Amino acid sequence: MARRSDTSCGGTGCLAVLLVLFVLPTVGYLLAVPLALPDLLAEQSPPQQLQGFGQYLIVYAIPVVVALLLALFASRRRTGARWLVPARAAALLALVAAALWWTQGKVGEYPVWNVRATAESMAAGLVALAFVVAVRRWDASRGGPRVAVGTHRPAPGEIWLAMVPLREDPARQLRHYCVVLAVHPGHAEVAQITTKDKDGRTDHIRMPNDGWDKASGRAHWVEFGRPPRLVEYGMFLKSRPQGRCPAPVWRQLSRQLG
């Protein structure tokens, strides 16, 4: 059979091209609009300019809103202080302003507006990309959660996906489903669920898939009669529970809690 040639670009390559050609310039232009738009208006015949408080407010509000959205996206791994996102947005705006000042010094005298605007947009876009990458890596290195738990805080009897600490080394965590046994300020007590065969052991009981795992078809066991593991709320990896613990299993787990 003839081998079909694949002329489509790879997923990663297409995303990279899309990022460079569309996303970076667009985000960069929105961040640079207080500089780029007046420059564009000045190139018109006859030259124009922004007029009135309302126009200036809109033009300067656009990069602020974009910076807040980028800071919020970059800070998804962190929970806590409300000032964090605005502070990071302010830092991003300062970095963009510095990049635009440098870029304008290089191309500010270039006679073609498109060249100036493209250079300014790309400079601001690259700064925004570097900012998001740096913030996310910083948060990850500090052990920040991958996804902040939203308005639904874990409750007893629910099954969640979380970074569960190892018993032999609580400083290390692995991704596991778990049953929430009890909740406290700042953390929850959980019993880890595993797919490793624990039949015949007294420290695990069989865990039906009913109500929480409709896809894998794999057998599960949950810890029983062992000290609960402590998981901070920031280490829960989704904003909603996977489901509820099957009633027969929850009755047994509840009895061990006293």
Image (cartoon, helix red, strand yellow):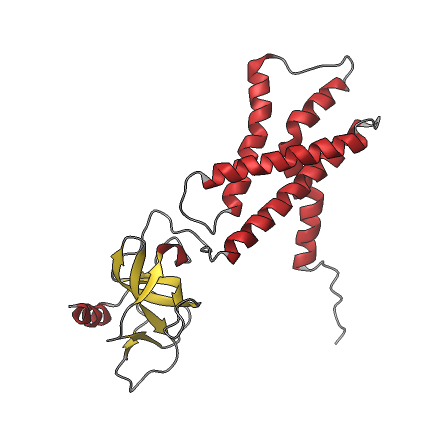
Tally of numbered discs: 0
Residue 87 image position (x, y, % from top left) = 50, 37
- Left or right: where 173 falls relative to 251: right
- Left or right: where 165 falls relative to 61: left
The answer to which quarter of the image holds residue 223 is bottom left
Q: Is residue 99 above or below residue 35?
A: below
Residue 150 image position (x, y, % from top left) = 37, 48
| Residue at x 60% of width, y 24% of height | 59
Q: Is residue 242 visible?
A: no
Q: Is residue 11 visible?
A: yes
| Residue at x 46% of width, y 41% of height | 84
Between 147 and 211, the one lying in front of the other is 147
Residue 226 image position (x, y, % from top left) = 26, 75
**Rendered-image quadrant of the C terminus:** bottom left
- Left or right: where 11 falls relative to 150: right
The answer to which quarter of the image holds residue 11 is bottom right
Q: Is residue 179 above or below residue 195?
A: above
